Amino acid sequence: MATTREQDRNRIVETPTQARQAEPGPSVLALLAASTGLAVLILAVVWFVFFRT
């Protein structure tokens, strides 16, 4: 079993704010754009099929 001193040497301590911070990369932006575009496309198809007279 590791002693307290050995455990403290390998531990990274961050504040709650630092632990929550993340850097959204381009994949997050691509996912957001693709899902929004797909939602708009689906709504447009539903509107043209059911509500266009």
Image (cartoon, helix red, strand yellow):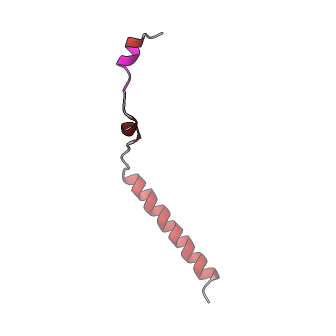
The answer to if 53 sits in the magenta stretch is no
Q: Out of 5 and 36, give the one closest to the viewer.
A: 5
Relative placement, left or right, of 13 versus 40 is left
**Relative vertical location of residue 38 with respect to residue 16 in this rendering, above or below:** below
- Picture quarter containing residue 20? top left
Tell me which residue sits at (38%, 23%) in the image: 11
| Residue reaching furthest to the right | 50
Tell me which residue sits at (44%, 11%) in the image: 2
Q: Out of 14 and 34, give the one closest to the viewer.
A: 14
- Picture quarter containing residue 49? bottom right
Residue 10 percent location from the top left of the image: 37, 20
Tell me which residue sits at (51%, 67%) in the image: 38
Q: Which residues are magenta?
A: 6-12
**Relative vertical location of residue 17 with respect to residue 46 in this rendering, above or below:** above
Relative placement, left or right, of 43 versus 36 is right
- Picture quarter containing residue 45? bottom right
The answer to if 11 sits in the magenta stretch is yes
